[in-house]
Image: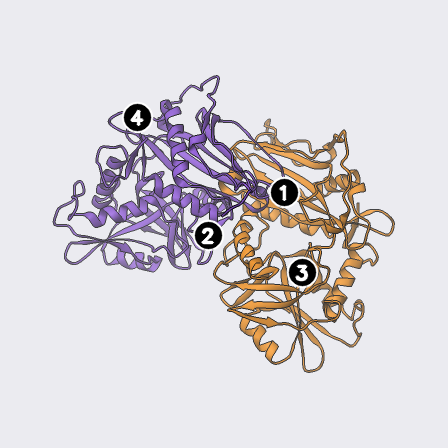
Chain colours: A purple, B orange
Amino acid sequence: MASTQRSPAELDASKLRITLAQELKPIPPSNDVHFGQNITDHMAFASYDPIEGWSAPEIKPYGPLTLYPASSCFQYATSAFEGMKAYIGPDGEPRLFRPAKNLARFLRSASRLSLPLFAPDELLNIMKTLLRVERRWIPDQRGHSLYLRPMIIGTRHNSALLWIMCSPIGQYPSIGARPLSLLAVNDAVRAWPGGTGEYKISGNYGPTIGPMQVAHQQGYDQCLWLLGDRVTEAGVMNIFVVLKRDDDSVDLLTPSLDGTILPGITRESVLDLAAAHPSRTVLPGLSKSLHIYAGERDITMGGLQTWLAEECLLEVLVVGTAVVIQPVGRIGYKGVDLILPVYDGGLGPVGKALHQRITDIQYGVFEWDGWSVRC
Amino acid sequence: MASTQRSPAELDASKLRITLAQELKPIPPSNDVHFGQNITDHMAFASYDPIEGWSAPEIKPYGPLTLYPASSCFQYATSAFEGMKAYIGPDGEPRLFRPAKNLARFLRSASRLSLPLFAPDELLNIMKTLLRVERRWIPDQRGHSLYLRPMIIGTRHNSALLWIMCSPIGQYPSIGARPLSLLAVNDAVRAWPGGTGEYKISGNYGPTIGPMQVAHQQGYDQCLWLLGDRVTEAGVMNIFVVLKRDDDSVDLLTPSLDGTILPGITRESVLDLAAAHPSRTVLPGLSKSLHIYAGERDITMGGLQTWLAEECLLEVLVVGTAVVIQPVGRIGYKGVDLILPVYDGGLGPVGKALHQRITDIQYGVFEWDGWSVRC
């Protein structure tokens, strides 16, 4: 189309400018840190306005933002984010786990809030450079990693800011594979059909803080979010159950993506790997003869109770970027605790196999379908 | 309780410090301005941290905030607000309309997001002082007002910022009493029982931007938010219907506060005033013999269609702080437009009577139960 008007600039990693911090922070021991407690020296940053489009991206010292009180991120919570981790592989190189999946979801979340769009590949390139700059912050112990938080917010007049900040984290939630306890909650509803539960937008999280505090006060680690009787998510994680079949094969089930469930990258990876066993690969510690029927199905509190009573509920697992895979030992529901099967070391055989395999892939010890991406 | 520990300071209007702007902005003509287009010279401001509590509140020049990227307002949308208006009364004094109602709701919204609490009365006193400082910005034409936006956001480590900004507005949405057109939407669901629709929190609004754009593209002014077949809100307004009874009395109905509906101050005022007619007061233009049965009832799209077919649907109204009361002329639903009764000048007799009375109260022309509060 012939036009003299310049169209708004796309996000372009080739324009990246780097300004290094004058003074670098000391790196804290990574074994007891949580996201946000320690932010690294630098952040990636770009701004957008509807006329000029995306600014040249920058890597610059981590520091405060200047925002007008009338910005749409305050008024309308136009704010979306991602959570990813970088790991050090055996070759000493930083790696990301299926980053294209996260960045595609980031784009979908931004789009749901009518925020400006960007090419995920460009953002990935910016992220890779950021990781090279912050290389010294990536812990090289197994189980430790550098958490990455890409974020986009609306400011004024359809403008926006995008950034990536980094925070080293140890074992999350620093309790290793200890079985989690969940308080089933259905008075506060996290997500509903036609709502925004399938997007990683900030507005989904604020209303969960109060119910989480109640759960903690009652001695539970996290909320199990119900929609009526139906299980949706646990804390900020997807949930799986492992059920014994009569023939000693097992079902590995998770709620289907009906709009109330965040399409987790770990969730998808668990489904993929379970389906690959034993035909494409044998998962660590599992028998070749064990067939895993991996799939999506509604999970209800009534169903959990029935499976427990029938002694076919083998494992309840929560999965997510932060925890990878963690067992659930107890679910409080209507004043009664459902006591779930526990195993030596925390995870049952299926959870353990999947945890081992996924972390092997994340740390570059096991190559699988290009899931681990070297930076 | 004997304790040597100082407890965190409460929000305290008596500590208010005022720093006036060096240079004042020219005041734009108020007839075509919307909220946010022009912000006044000053804002009220206070900050909170869990140890010190609330800072001494300030009135200071309106300007940018400095926030760290890891602030919870970005990550978790810990952000709540209010919308209020100041009017000039016949005595030339600024007035607020039932401000205690808004500020009590503000506190509830903040509390829902686990943000720090404050005494609404202290905030009202700060607001009154702000209005005296910004007196020249309050338009004195009828229909014009100074819009006030109190807002609270979470920052880091359970700290928070609270501010009030002001923006002069003319007739909103600058179309006077022209009947609005609404597009009924039930694929995107604004609020859900157990969700947060009854709170004025920012996270409720971001996801509505996209559907609103779709409505505009299809030639509608606003979305009518459905839950299944059930009408909840219209745009950011509550909705009412006026139905004819056989005996020529009328029903004035609005959906009940089931958690999906913002408990609007205009909504409550409409219900109160309608119930007061004719026993306590006769509403302008209405007959003393007209009885209005004002109350809460489910309104469904099927119900609207039936009432239309039976010719008992007299008026459909949307109400809110911004519009006060506006008629609805058309609702698009499943590809068909419901054409609603329209009246000369826009509003029907009940809507007109209520609009006249409420604005008379707001502008201090009619005294009613202390609803109009002089500053």
- Residue sitting at 83 percent across and 51 percent down? B89
Q: Do the residues labelled 1 and 2 touch (CB within 8 Å)?
A: no
Q: Distance between the residues labelled 1 and 4?
A: 43 Å
Q: What element carries label 2?
A: loop
| A147 sits left or right of B368 in the view | left
- The chain letter for the residue carrying disc 3 is B
Q: Which mark is residue B319?
A: 3
Please, which chain is the residue tagged with disc 1 on?
A: B
Is mark 4 in CB contact (under 8 Å) with mark 3?
no
Using the numbered discs, state the Cα–Cα distance from disc 1 to disc 3 in whole angstroms: 22 Å
Residue drawn at 80 percent across, 41 percent down: B135
Q: How crowded is mark 3: few (under 14 residues within 10 Å), some or many (20 or more)?
A: many
Compared to residue B131, the image places residue A249 above or below, namely below
- Amino acid type at image mark 4: Asp
The residue at the far top in this view is A23
Q: Which of marks 1 and 3 is nearer the N terminus?
A: 1
Q: Could you tell me residue A87's position as x and y percent?
A: 31, 31
As rendered, which of A95 and B128 lies closer to the eye?
A95
Q: What element carries label 1?
A: strand
The disc labelled 3 sits on which kind of residue?
A: Val
- The answer to whether tags 2 and 4 share a subunit is yes
Q: Residue beneath label 4, please? A: A140
Q: Which labelled disc corresponds to residue A104?
A: none
> Given the image, on which type of amino acid does mark 2 rest?
Thr
Pinpoint the chain carrying mark 2.
A
Residue A35, percent from left and from top: 42, 33
**Observer-nearest residue: A108 or A363?**
A108
Q: Mark 2 points at which residue?
A: A196
